[in-house]
Image (spheres, helix red, strand yellow):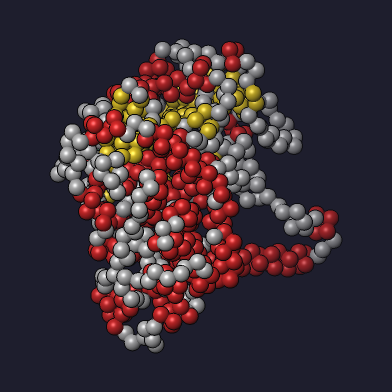
Amino acid sequence: MAHKVKIAARLRPRIGIELEDDSIHVVNGEDGSYVGVVNPRDPNSFFRFPFSSCYDQSATQEEIFNNDVQPLIDVAFHGVTVTIFAYGVTSSGKTHTMQGTKAEPGVIPRVVEAVIDRKATLPAGQVSLAASYYEIYKDEVYDLFVNREAAPKLPVRENDVGQVFVANLSSMPIDTFADFDALFSRANKQRSVGATNLNRASSRSHAILNMEISIKEGDKILTGKINLVDLAGSENNKLTGNDATRMAESSAINKSLSVLGQVVHALNQGASRIPYRNSKLTRILQDALGGSSVGLLICNLAPGAKFRQDTLNTLNFAVRTKNVENKPVINERDNAPPPKRHFAAIPPTAPKLAPASLPSTSNAMRGPSQQLLAGSSRVPRPSMAVARRPSLALAGISRKKGSAPRASALLALSESEIDERIAKAVEAEVARRLAAQERARREEEEERSVEAELSRIEEDESASGSGSTSMEERPIPSGLLTPLLKKHKDLDDELRQRLQDLEKKFEHTSKELQLVDVLSPISRKKTGRAYVALARAHSEKGNLQVALEMYRKAETYVPDNLKLKERIIEIEWAAKNGKEFKPSPKKARKQKSKKRSKLAKQPRPTDSLEQDENQDPNVTEGTSKTSPGKRPAGELGDGNLPIQTPPKKLKIAAAGEDVTSDAEDLEQPVLGKKGMKRLIDEA
Ligand SMILES: Nc1ncnc2c1ncn2[C@@H]1O[C@H](COP(=O)(O)OP(=O)(O)OP(=O)(O)O)[C@@H](O)[C@H]1O
């Protein structure tokens, strides 16, 4: 039976000089619990996000553990994998929730202690515990139990039964809490942590502690696992004030979290291909999202208007994750030693095991977690040594049909012919690898230039200020919300409706999703920009529904653009409430760096719009870096996404003229012929 990922939301208290304000609040009432977020466009209304567990600023570590975590320990003792992960923007309290402090221990130490206590209640020798701890830093996996200087990058592999694991990871037997505490404290000193404006000890990596519980039951061994994941925070480089090193980390963090969002999105749509492989984080968490484990997502939220947009993003992610269904299985293997094999015996092929249905839950399931796991499947597994052995295919020893010379053919060749063939094959392989390396290098370069471009644009936007920022800083008078809470009880239904509408829209975009997977980062951004341009033209004409659709399509291509998400929420709200939507005025681009102003002063062949439009779109990346200074102020760009090549018709649209055929002109310079045709079809 399917098991949905459970969501808990936790709002941290104000820290340091943070202002008192109610922009984000938690309500635990008779009608249920929810997180309220004041609407950036209308301070008199707010969005309501209902979850079964919502913790306000006064919630204790103990409360969270007792309500949401403790029941999962039972589940793990029945041989099921449990994954608990803390998600949220940087400085929202993920590490506090997962690790805590000596005075207020968090989920990790409490889980370990509870597991050790539980083991003590069972017959000696029946249960053994082992822990491993690793981090994913800039998309590489490192063992945190190994001295950092000596720690190699660890590969992520998949075993014969499709389970993903980190190869060569150390696994430490745990007998007492003191054992664990010493190991864990030492390991945490190795974790990549750095200071940002928002958090003096910001985690720059995703950290995963895995507790493995092996339970002997007659001639079977059950293996329960508890994965405790402290994700690095999604980051807004405007707020974190990151330097070059931090930016590189931040880009890796944001990328992996973005893939996490894409995975959840694809799962919600029932997509045939889920992009787990696009980052190590999602590959490792594959089992927790749409896999065979039981999941709990703790959404950490930071208070105040400053974090409102991040909070909306976190909560939207949580709402989508709420619908992700897992199919928990019991990991079981035979305890009996495998029969001794004669050295000459042909090794048996490891069987591919599909989850088998439980013969009867009452028989297979014992203990208080019976209800929780009703319908779980039991996976009989061969002995661990076999199950963990990477398949030949995964070890890269697989042979494509017809690619290897047959033995009989080889026998007919002379030694020198064989040597020649081998030399040719080696040459071809070396050439293939060099080409692959070159491709990867070019892609990396492309990505870097796009990242640089985006952060430059973000800087420009923050320098010119935005309407919503000033609104964000306005504190909500205390007591204002109480009557509003009553007035807007129906917002829950509204929200659900909104999300349903959203999901419907997403169904339409599944084609885009597939396309997104194959497009290069630059093409994705260009397509996103094209949709934003269309959306803006429609919103200026008052066609809010069409504009909304275009903005949503843009979001498929640039899922990380915060301004775009904000714009979608604003238009949805305006459309729903029959209000007029006024897009924020387009901003003049400011000269930021000396380098750019110097470049802007350099003579150019022409400053005319025609010139820009006629440029080859594939060359505009480079050109665009120098062109903002020459761009007519207030005419181009949306404030959400950068428009690199000024589309002529968009300029006309801004002047209030007919824009019905904008799509064609807009795409011509940005997308090329094929892309243009596809976009016209879609539009
Ligand atoms: N519930 C809480 N009670 C008291 N202090 C808290 C709470 N949650 C967080 N804090 C404090 O807020 C600050 C930021 O928290 P924390 O480091 O846990 O954030 P984070 O989400 O892990 O950030 P990052 O992603 O940058 O690592 C810390 O000083 C922490 O002690």
- Foreground residue among 680 and 77: 680
Quarter of the image holding residue 67?
top left
User: Is 25 left or right of 623, judged from the image as shown?
Assistant: left
Q: Residue at x 70, y 68 (%)?
A: 424
Q: Residue at x 53, y 36 (%)?
A: 290
- Quarter of the figure with the N terminus: top right
- Quarter of the figure with the C terminus: bottom right
User: Is 247 left or right of 83, judged from the image as shown?
Assistant: left
Residue 100, image x, y percentages? 27, 33
- Foreground residue among 382 and 53: 53
Number of numbered discs overlaid on the protein picture: 0
Residue 636, image x, y percentages? 37, 70
Residue 556 visible within the image: yes
Residue 216 against residue 381 in the figure, above or below: above
Residue 96 against residue 518 in the figure, above or below: above
- Foreground residue among 309 and 259: 309
Q: Residue at x 76, y 64 (%)?
A: 418
- Foreground residue among 676 and 192: 676
Residue 185 against residue 393 in the figure, above or below: above
Q: Residue at x 34, y 27 (%)?
A: 33
Quarter of the image holding residue 217?
top right
Residue 625 against residue 257 in the figure, above or below: below
Residue 100 visible within the image: no
Residue 651, image x, y percentages? 40, 72
Residue 182, image x, y percentages? 30, 32
